[in-house]
Amino acid sequence: MKKILFILIILIFPLQLSAQYGWTNAEIYLKNGTVLKGEANLTMMSKDINLKKEKVKFRTNKNGKKSKYIPEEVDYIIFTIKSQEKENGKKITKTKKAKYIPIYLNNKQTKLGFAELIIDGKMQLVGRTVSVQRGGGIMFPSDPNVPNSKPIYSPFYIFNHNEIMFLKEGEKPEVFNQTSLTKSFKKRASKYFKDCPILQNKIKNKDFKKEDLEAIVNYYNSSCN
């Protein structure tokens, strides 16, 4: 009963999104060497039904003309995200830089999308936020541009994303943050890191768990060949 309650608590854990899906101050670095400075908008994509090709929208200012760019045209995007937090009873404004890169979403490497680069290196940790259909209902994350907006449904979230992925060069990224009733994190991660026995053993011995994704990637980059 306690395990069921724990899972339910995880499943309803509130989602908080950064404002990268609304119009946000950004710099877009194109593959042709052009740097666009102004505001950018990333469309929320569906995980289960993806009928559109991912694009980033750009405008120089609120009244500027909009243009669109597909991942194949983009080297990376830097979003400047501002948020207000309370410290010692006072509201303060904090600024975060979020770097987004194009990533392949299929094994054939024919489909590209955008993801936030959380950790860089020979192995990368990247994150995406997508709408997810579960049990006949659709989960739409809260809109950062709408005051008091709340998500309808949220599974297990960290890093402000509902898909956190390990990414090895030349491979499709693998999602590792979500709960699975068919295969444990330990089994999946142990198989995934078969190229690094020392890390594989640490995962098997539970020195690293699902909550330690950043530490796992840092360890791989520093200690695995």
Image (spheres, rainbow, N blue to C red):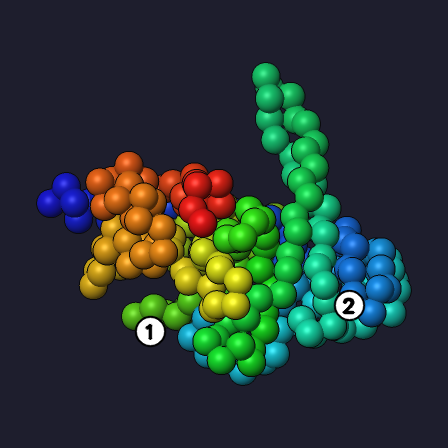
At horizontal 54% and vertical 53% (from top left) the residue drawn is 122
Mark 1 or 2, which is nearer the eye?
2
**Point 49% across, 80% down: residue:** 108
Is disc 2 surrounded by few (<14), some (14 to 19) or many (20+) residues within 10 Å?
A: few
Q: Nearer the viewer, residue 4 or 190?
A: 190
Lateral position of residue 221 relative to residue 55, left or right: left
All told, the count of numbered labels is 2
**Residue assigned mark 1:** 136
Q: Position of residue 160 (x, y in %)?
A: 51, 48
Label 1 packing within 10 angstroms: few (<14), some (14-19), many (20+)? few
Location of residue 76 by image quarter: bottom right
Residue 86 image offset from top left, x and y in percent: 60, 26
Is residue 90 something that shows in the picture?
Answer: yes
Q: Position of residue 181 (x, y in %)?
A: 21, 60
**Badge number at residue 31:** 2
Locate residue 97 relative to residue 181 in the image: left or right.
right
| Nearest the eye: 131 or 178 | 178
> In the image, is residue 6 above or below residue 179?
above
Q: Image point 64% across, 60% down: which residue?
A: 101
**In the visual, does 101 lie left or right of 61?**
left
Compared to 91, does 58 lie above or below? below
Hey, which residue is sitting farthest front in the picture?
Answer: 225
- Kind of residue at badge 1: Gly
Checking the image for residue 45, the label placed there is none
